[in-house]
Image: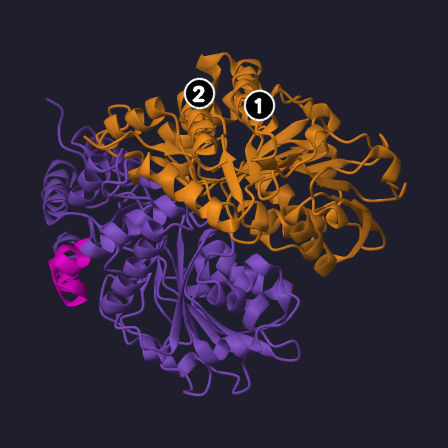
Chain colours: A orange, B purple
Amino acid sequence: MRLPVHNFNAGPTVLPKAVLQKVQAELMDYLGTGMSIMEMSHRSTVFDDLMVKVDGDLRRLLEIPQNYKTLFLQGGASLQFSMVPMNLLPLDGSADYIVNGVWGEKAVKEAQKVGSVHLVASTKRQNFDRVPERDLMSFDSHAGYVHFTSNETIQGVQWPMEPDVPAEIPLICDMSSDILSRPIDVSKYGLIYAGAQKNAGPAGVTMVIIREDLLGSVPNDLATMLDYRLQAEKKSLINTPPSFAIYVLGLVLGWLLDLGGLPAISRLNQQKAILLYDVIDTSEGFYRGHAQSDSRSLMNVTFRLETTELEESFAKEALAQGMVGLKGHRSVGGLRASIYNACPLESVETLATFMKDFQGKYA
Amino acid sequence: MRLPVHNFNAGPTVLPKAVLQKVQAELMDYLGTGMSIMEMSHRSTVFDDLMVKVDGDLRRLLEIPQNYKTLFLQGGASLQFSMVPMNLLPLDGSADYIVNGVWGEKAVKEAQKVGSVHLVASTKRQNFDRVPERDLMSFDSHAGYVHFTSNETIQGVQWPMEPDVPAEIPLICDMSSDILSRPIDVSKYGLIYAGAQKNAGPAGVTMVIIREDLLGSVPNDLATMLDYRLQAEKKSLINTPPSFAIYVLGLVLGWLLDLGGLPAISRLNQQKAILLYDVIDTSEGFYRGHAQSDSRSLMNVTFRLETTELEESFAKEALAQGMVGLKGHRSVGGLRASIYNACPLESVETLATFMKDFQGKYA
């Protein structure tokens, strides 16, 4: 028999087994309709009910206040890099960006095509091994918004909590890789966006949570599909939504609620991350964590070994034992274990044991 | 036992049963990887292979020449309404639009946000019951492109073949609702785009076929995700693609190839449409087809009855016999049977019989 797979892909990645089983079970017949969810009209009451449930469950999990709209869009966070400034960067003003990794840099690049960007702080010179210190951040008090990336998947750097920014400036966050992994206070944010394919579902649907008052400043001539205000008015149904991806997202939200919501998954995520960081910290330098301790990601554990040859052996031997996705991002190399919500504790324990054994063999 | 469902939804709509069975069978384990296709990294060789196969099968079916790029994007045709002019409408020029239905009107509206639009012809005054006659179309010989909609789902109006436009102007087509339903000569087009959810797969992926030379005129400052040139360079993998939707699209393409390709499906589609139009034409006015004979859609058969009450009875009684999706679009009313590629002949025969019985009962 084949070994079980332990999936450490950075996204798309492992989904809860119970979710996949449900998808499989009702694939040919969704709720007794005799049709697959993929075959349902997005204007049907069955699909309406699904949208209401997904929206309600997302609101319940994140405790989203009533004065926020939730949108289910397409194009991933990368399209949001552009939609955020198109909708919210004032023509005569600028926006503040905090950069602590490659995704934040990409967000800046897209915003600069739309308008003026002020770089609050960047840890690029530290090779993105941390989030910026509060003292090093200088905000523009007239900024349209402040943008940051809560978790950088490539570097494995995460904000322990949202940055301390001036209260009057809307805070905007690319939360693609840690949304729903821990409780957050949504009321601190003006807008949150996230692709689903790491903690929340399959690729193909992007969540946007936006404070209603911000919709008032959306310009009038935007492309309809790129206009937050129109998307909110039409409840994300301007055109056919990515219905299957939304359906699976809904199942993952239900799974999270069944587990006990974000406090419960947050505890599990901490437990998993500690297992791996402990191996790194007690390895006497055999494993070299990329991120500084206070900026370590609970989602993506990034580390290096002394040589790239050794790193290759690590990935290869791990793969032979059923552990996939451990190579670092092609742009930075090294090793990376992505341990999002649906990555089972058992997979992380297997990896931790492997890491110790590997050190014993090669140290 | 419940009646079998006959799905006449306008999209999303019925998928081939064999495709759904395959999705179900390999949902937990794609090609022996031990993972669902939804859990696979889009940078893996398994997914690379899938993209190559989908691309190759689309090229084979449509006989796409080598000097065309194929893209697999998100956002549906509605986002293409904006991307086409953003990429291809010259700053100092204009674009020609032919309008024969609601979707064409929407395309114009989005293009006008980007630049100058010249309306070649519109059949709005005929309540969009036909495509424009050649004599009534006046082209701008300096137009950046000519845009048309090959099939209007709401009105049930289809071009029998592409309009006769000046050879030097690139022809652009929204082919969302009849792509892959019949053979076409791709070399006549500059660009073709289509959401998958009618003839080709589930919602969530949009196909774009673009002649390479047009990529040269894409402006430099477009949002990365909206830039055809960058999407082509990165083979649609700038960010995480909608991998599951692409996978199902691939299965539908395989199903079409197994059937005998576009000549075979085209014969079947004609056979299905004739069944329904024959009932309409021999009903002595009980059923009133919306489209003029020479503009009738083989995909969406639209018709009215004498009163809206009778139309409601029709939809209700049909539903009771397992036929779903027969109400016309909410914007125009009436009745509509969408009979795309995967709608079985048996479903259309069932509907034709029902129509005759219904007439017998109420005429």
Q: Is residue B114 magenta?
A: no
- Residue at the (88%, 42%) spot, across then down: A138
Q: Secondary structure at mark 1?
A: helix
- Residue A194 in the image: state x and y as whole percent: 57, 38
Chain letter for mark 1, please.
A
**Region of the chain picked out in magenta, as a range:** B255-272
Relative to A343, residue B153 above or below: below
Occupied quadrant, residue A223:
bottom right
In this view of the protein, can residue A50 be seen by the observer?
yes
- Residue at the (49%, 77%) spot, across then down: B214
Distance between the Cα atoms at labels 2 and 1? 15 Å
Relative to B189, residue A133 above or below: above
Occupied quadrant, residue A101:
top right
Residue type highlighted by circle 1:
Asp
Q: Is residue A169 left or right of residue A56?
A: right
Chain letter for mark 2, please.
A
Q: Nearer the viewer, residue B235 or A286?
A: A286
Relative to B74, residue B215 above or below: below
Q: Secondary structure at mark 2?
A: helix
Residue type highlighted by circle 2:
Leu
In this view of the protein, can residue B109 be seen by the observer?
no
Residue ID for mark 2: A345
Helix, strand or loop: magenta stretch: helix
Q: Quadrant of the N terminus of chain A?
A: top left
Circle 2 residues within 10 Å: few <14, some 14–19, many ≥20: some
- Residue at the (37%, 31%) spot, across then down: A6
Q: Nearer the viewer, residue A197 or B58?
A: A197
- Residue A8 in the image: state x and y as whole percent: 44, 35
Q: Nearer the viewer, mark 2 or mark 1?
A: 1
Q: Nearer the viewer, residue B150 or B274?
A: B150
Residue ID for mark 1: A278
